Image (cartoon, rainbow, N blue to C red):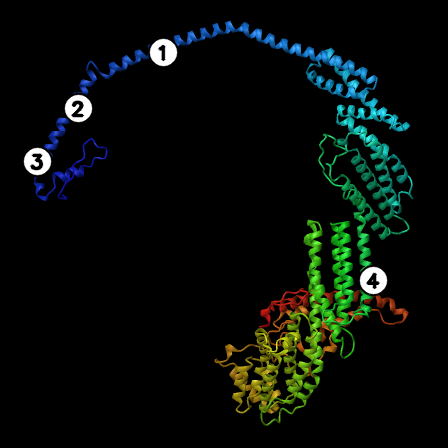
């Protein structure tokens, strides 16, 4: 059908395909007519093949060479084969029996030979054992220990071969005789040692005693341990009698006598007795171990007895430390003496090669560790006495002048005390006692931050602390912030691993950072006090009658002059860049808030007056951008080119001062037409508050009778579709303004705040965080201009309540002092928590400056000044 047909497959192929044959037979449509002829031909061929197959099958089944005949023949051959196999098997069995009978005599001869050899060997060994045993008995009687030692080893080795023959009476008798001889030798050697030491004849009998030690080595570990134990007890008998039987000699006051006695005893041992005992016995080390164990038990009993004294007197801490230090020195001496050699155990003297399982360190001093809490308590009392002294003493010694890098002398003294105490405790204990000390050190870091550093910033008077004092506090807080972190790292390196996670001084580091932030706010307050005259001049200006906008107002020049002069004085003594930047940021924020509050006190304000204020604000902003030019003036002298302020600081200044713009731009709009004022308020202020809109009306001086119409228009436009979705509920700028009588001044209300009013956590939680210097609204923070005074006054109030009680009559003094004590603790805890929170947010805010805290050189990245 495809035209050209391929060669057809064979009919015998496994994959035969009839379609291929059909395509060959009917390769063209014209051949279809021959289907009947082809079919009949195939049928005829099929019939012929079937007949041929039937014929062949019949011939195969019934012919002379048929399959049935072949099967019968095969079965007959198999039967013959099985018979032959059985015959071969029978012959093999017979052959094996013949060979076995032939070799039986040979096997008997081999067994006889082997038994004879064993018997001869056993008899020879028995003869040697008997001979050696008799010789050993004779040598033992004459105390010839050198020969006895080698002969005893041979006897014991030979005896081990007869352990399986003890059922024989003669062998059992000989075994009992050898055992008895071993016991006699043991007792004889021990007796020789006891007599020699009792009569003081060690030197005369030294050779015999040295040979006797060979007997003990041959007798085994138990014999050797018995002799060493006896010797140790003999040498320490006098020590136990003197120091255990006499309370005076055994007291902690005479601890040096114990160690001196041991050193004399060891010296005598090395001079007289060390040559007697083999070196691998480690007798000197056994003496030291027994002495340490006994002394440790003595100390435990003495210390327990001292703690149970009925008179209530406790152990002298200085005496306890002295004893502990002397004990540790003694342990170090023993450790150096025996560290080069493997440690032997008095209980397991199993071989000549001992393994050193533990050191002498702590072998005696462990008895003191449960009582080191007394030492920690003494350090607590010492620090408690130091804090009031530091609070009363001058910040710097009389012979030392102030410098911008100076740190309060008490901080250096406290640091050295901490360093010495930590080093001393780490030598005494690296476990729970060191953790207790770490908690004590942390406690007094908080006390130092609160009662010493913060108290300096709380000096009474209008001017408060001096500039030099504030700088000293700032430097000291920075010093302790860095060293507190290092202190924590050092403690973690020394303390045991199980207590590492419990060492945490981060809250103390945050507390010192909080003190640093309070010092910066105190510096800002210095500038604010100097600017009071300029603000007063601004308030005295008649802003409602101003007719035209001119150059900057006169108060602006005075304000900028005072700010630059005071900032230059302050930044000249602020060393670190991060603190200079923090001061500048905080000063800008305080001045911005002071400007807003003064605007409120200048009401009523006309449109021209608001425009003039906006111009004054621009001039003030440009002046504040160059605040940091006063930092590091020496570098400015070396580089005469103009100061280029940091771009980040310029952005911060503009963002902070721009908060004033919505208020002034709204005040610039005339009240007529009234829709214009309403639209200006919705555009610039952008809130839905009726109260805040009424504040704008009051600031502009609009008459009360006109408020109603303006409020109606405000409600209509506020609720309209165009502005409703864009407005906020309360403006962060206007909401805190004009909320209380007399709120127009800078820092108003600071003197009336108490500790309960200061919640640094709450201040920091909102967008107006305590030290945030970004452009933020004032709704979520207190009066930022008086924030420094709030902190200082609140802390001062708490510290005064914790100070010395006032003079009261005796009848009520006790009750008041009790109540004051509880209040003082609560106030102290509250102030500490505030300082820590204050420091955390100060770290977060200044951390964005790219300057790492704790650097002593105050260096910053060169790019920071760009």
Q: Left or right? Give the position of 167 relative to 265.
A: left
- Circle 3 packing at 10 Å, graded few (<14), some (14-19), many (20+), is few
The disc placed on residue 82 is: 1
Does residue 322 appear anywhere in the picture?
A: yes
Point out residue 423 in the picture as x, y percentages from the top left corner: 76, 54
Above or below residue 557? Residue 518 is: above
Question: Which dot marks residue 385?
Answer: 4
Report helix, strand or loop for mark 4: helix
Whether tag 2 and tag 4 are in contact, CB under 8 A, the answer is: no
Q: Nearer the viewer, mark 2 or mark 4?
A: 4
The kind of secondary structure element at disc 3 is helix
Report the residue marked by disc 3. 37
From the viewer's perspective, tell me whether residue 600 is left or right of residue 368.
Answer: left
Mark 2 neighbour density, 10 Å: few (under 14) some (14–19) many (20 or more): few
Q: Who comes first in sequence, dot 3 or dot 2?
A: 3
- Locate residue 194: give its quadrant: top right
The vertical placement of 583 against 855, above or below, is below
- For residue 814, the mark is none
Residue 783 visible here: no
How packed is label 4: few (under 14 Cα within 10 Å), some, or many (20 or more)? few
Residue 479 horizontal/vertical position (percent): 71, 65
Q: Nearer the viewer, mark 3 or mark 4?
A: 4
* Separation (CA) of disc 4 from disc 1: 117 Å
Q: Secondary structure at mark 2?
A: helix
Around disc 1, counting alpha carbons within 10 Å, would you say few (fewer than 14), some (14 to 19), or many (20 or more)? Answer: few
Real-space Cα distance between discs 3 and 4?
Answer: 136 Å
Which quadrant of the figure contains the C terminus?
Answer: bottom right
Depth order, front residue of 501/289: 289
- Checking the image for residue 53, the label placed there is 2
Q: Give the CA separation, mark 3 to mark 2.
A: 25 Å
Specify which label sits upstream in the sequence, 3 or 4.
3
């Amino acid at each position: 059908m495809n035209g050209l047909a391929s060669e057809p497959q064979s009919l015998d192929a496994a994959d035969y395909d009839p379609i291929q044959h059909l395509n060959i037979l009917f390769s063209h449509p014209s051949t279809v007519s021959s289907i009947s002829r082809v079919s009949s031909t195939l049928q005829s061929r099929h019939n012929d093949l079937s007949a041929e197959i039937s014929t062949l099958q019949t011939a195969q089944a019934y012919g002379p060479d048929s399959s049935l005949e072949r099967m019968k023949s095969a079965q007959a051959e198999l039967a013959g084969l099985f018979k032959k196999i059985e015959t071969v098997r029978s012959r093999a069995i017979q052959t094996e029996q013949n060979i076995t009978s032939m070799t039986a005599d040979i096997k008997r001869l081999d067994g006889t030979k082997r038994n004879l050899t064993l018997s001869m060997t056993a008899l020879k060994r028995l003869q040697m054992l008997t001979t050696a045993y008799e010789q050993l008995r004779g040598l033992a009687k004459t105390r010839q220990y050198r020969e006895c030692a080698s002969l005893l080893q041979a006897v014991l080795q030979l005896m081990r071969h007869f352990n399986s023959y003890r059922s024989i009476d003669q062998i059992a008798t000989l075994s009992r005789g050898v055992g008895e001889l071993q016991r006699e030798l043991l007792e004889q050697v021990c007796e020789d040692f006891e007599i020699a030491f009792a009569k003081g004849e060690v030197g005369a009998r030294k050779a015999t005693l040295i040979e006797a030690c060979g007997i003990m080595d041959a007798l085994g570990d138990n014999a050797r341990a018995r002799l060493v134990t006896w010797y140790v007890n003999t040498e320490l008998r006098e020590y136990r009698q003197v120091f255990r039987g006499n309370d005076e000699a055994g007291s902690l006051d005479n601890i040096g006598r114990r160690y001196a006695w041991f050193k004399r005893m060891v010296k005598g041992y090395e001079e007289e007795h060390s040559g007697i005992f083999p070196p691998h016995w480690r007798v000197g080390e056994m003496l030291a171990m027994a002495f340490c164990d006994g002394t440790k038990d003595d100390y435990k009993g003495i210390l327990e007895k001292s703690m149970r004294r009925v008179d209530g007197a406790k152990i002298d801490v200085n005496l306890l430390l002295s004893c502990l230090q002397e004990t540790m020195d003694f342990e170090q001496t023993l450790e150096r003496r025996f560290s080069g050699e493997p440690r032997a155990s008095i209980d397991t003297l199993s071989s000549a090669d001992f393994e050193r399982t533990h050191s002498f360190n702590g072998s005696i001093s462990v008895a003191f560790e449960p009582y080191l809490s007394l030492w920690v308590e003494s350090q607590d009392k010492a620090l408690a006495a130091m804090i009031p002294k530091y609070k009363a003493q001058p910040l710097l010694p009389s012979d030392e002048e102030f410098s911008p890098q100076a740190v309060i002398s008490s901080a250096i003294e406290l640091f050295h005390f901490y360093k010495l105490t930590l080093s001393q405790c780490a030598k005494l204990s690296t476990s729970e006692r060191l953790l207790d000390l770490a908690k004590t050190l942390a406690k007094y870091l908080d006390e130092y931050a609160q009662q010493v550093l913060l108290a300096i910033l709380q000096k009474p008077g209008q001017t408060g602390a001096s500039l030099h004092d504030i700088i000293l506090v700032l430097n000291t807080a920075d010093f302790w912030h860095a060293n507190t972190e290092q202190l924590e790292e050092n403690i973690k390196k020394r303390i045991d691993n199980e207590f590492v996670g419990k060492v945490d001084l981060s809250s103390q580091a945050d507390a010192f950072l909080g003190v640093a932030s309070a010092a910066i706010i105190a510096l800002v307050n210095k500038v604010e006090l100097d600017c009071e005259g300029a603000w007063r001049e601004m308030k005295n200006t008649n802003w409602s009658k101003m007719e035209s906008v001119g150059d900057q107002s006169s108060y602006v020049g005075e304000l900028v002059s005072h700010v630059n002069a005071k900032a230059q004085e302050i930044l000249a003594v602020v060393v670190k860049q991060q603190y200079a930047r923090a001061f500048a940021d905080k000063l800008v924020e305080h001045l911005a808030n002071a400007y807003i509050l003064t605007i409120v006190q200048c009401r009523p304000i006309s449109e021209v007056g608001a425009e003039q204020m906006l111009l004054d604000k621009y001039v003030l902003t440009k002046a504040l951008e160059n605040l940091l030019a006063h930092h590091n003036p020496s570098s400015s002298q070396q580089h005469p080119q103009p100061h280029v302020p940091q771009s980040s600081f310029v952005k911060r200044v503009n963002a902070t001062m721009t908060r004033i713009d919505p208020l002034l731009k709204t005040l610039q709009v005339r009240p007529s037409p009234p829709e214009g004022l309403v639209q200006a308020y919705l555009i610039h202020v952008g809130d839905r508050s009726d109260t805040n809109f009424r504040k704008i009306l009051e600031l502009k001086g609009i008459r009360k009778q006109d408020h109603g119409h303006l409020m109606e228009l405000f409600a209509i436009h506020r609720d309209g579709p165009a502005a409703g979705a864009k407005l906020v509920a309360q403006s962060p700028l206007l909401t805190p303004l004009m909320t209380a009588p007399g709120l127009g001044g800078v820092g108003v209300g600071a003197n009336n705040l108490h500790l309960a009013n200061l919640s640094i956590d709450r201040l920091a939680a909102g967008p107006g965080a305590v030290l945030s210097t970004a452009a933020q609204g004032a709704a979520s923070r207190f009066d930022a201009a008086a924030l420094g005074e709030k902190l200082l006054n609140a802390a001062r109030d708490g510290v005064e309540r914790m100070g010395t009680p006032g003079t009261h009559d005796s009848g009520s003094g006790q009750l008041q002092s009790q109540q004051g004590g509880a209040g003082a603790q609560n106030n102290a805890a509250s102030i500490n928590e505030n300082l820590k929170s204050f420091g955390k947010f100060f770290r977060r805010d200044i951390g964005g400056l790219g300057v790492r805290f704790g650097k002593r050189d105050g260096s910053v990245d060169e790019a920071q000044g760009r």
